Image: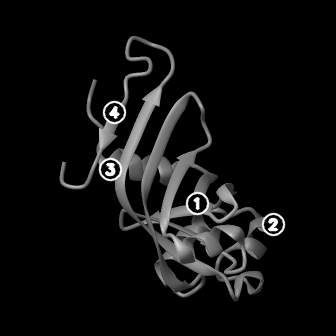
Amino acid sequence: MAGLGWDEVAARFAAAANWWVATSGPAGPHAVPVWGVVVDDVLHFYGDPNAVRSQNLAADPRVALHLESGSDVLLVHGEAVALGPAGGVDAVNAAYAAKYAAPDDAQYLPDAPLNDASLLYGVRPERALAWSLGGEDSMRMRRWAPGG
């Protein structure tokens, strides 16, 4: 079985419609589904600064991201870095518009009026883990870390 490369991690997150973002705060763990895109191998998501995830990240930037599947698992642990206004990076806006292209999606994109106050986050990954159920390599964990 091959190891886990960042190219695979980025491609799988880029293809997934929804990601789970997990943070931690005074009330304990908090996980929510978000839309996300990958631009220049960086995982990006956004959120209202008053949302629990944003409040948690302001106090503790550690984050875990997970794809939707519980049988073909991919987790990324790292640090979410606030990059400024959600609609402030043209390449990220273009990636969101291309990925979430249904007519009803436009109102929720990071550069839409609804998200004027939202923050854009980029994830600085520290490690990634992947495993699948079934087959001869069932439950064999693959790992990625920067530089290795």
First in sequence, mark 2 or 3: give its number: 3
Disc 3 versus disc 4: distance between alpha carbons?
14 Å
Q: Are marks 3 and 4 in contact (CB under 8 Å)?
A: no
Q: Are marks 2 and 4 in contact (CB under 8 Å)?
A: no
- Assign a secondary structure to mark 2: helix
First in sequence, mark 2 or 4: give its number: 2
Residue that lies at the very extreme toward the front in this rendered image: 26
First in sequence, mark 1 or 4: give its number: 1
**Mark 3 — residue?**
7
Residue that lies at the very extreme toward the top in this rendered image: 136
Disc 1 versus disc 4: distance between alpha carbons?
23 Å
- Assign a secondary structure to mark 4: strand
Q: Are marks 2 and 3 in contact (CB under 8 Å)?
A: no
Disc 1 versus disc 2: distance between alpha carbons?
28 Å
Q: Residue at x 47, y 41 (%)?
A: 74
First in sequence, mark 3 or 4: give its number: 3
Q: Is residue 18 visible?
A: yes
Quadrant assignment for the N terminus: top left
Q: Are marks 1 and 4 in contact (CB under 8 Å)?
A: no
Q: Amino acid at mark 1?
A: Thr
* Nearer mark to the viewer, of 3 and 4: 4
Using the rendered view, name the quadrant where residue 70 is placed: top right
Q: Residue at x 40, y 40 (%)?
A: 129
Query: Residue 23 bears which disc, if any?
Result: 1
* Nearer mark to the viewer, of 3 and 1: 1
Q: Residue at x 59, y 55 (%)?
A: 22
**Mark 4 — residue?**
142
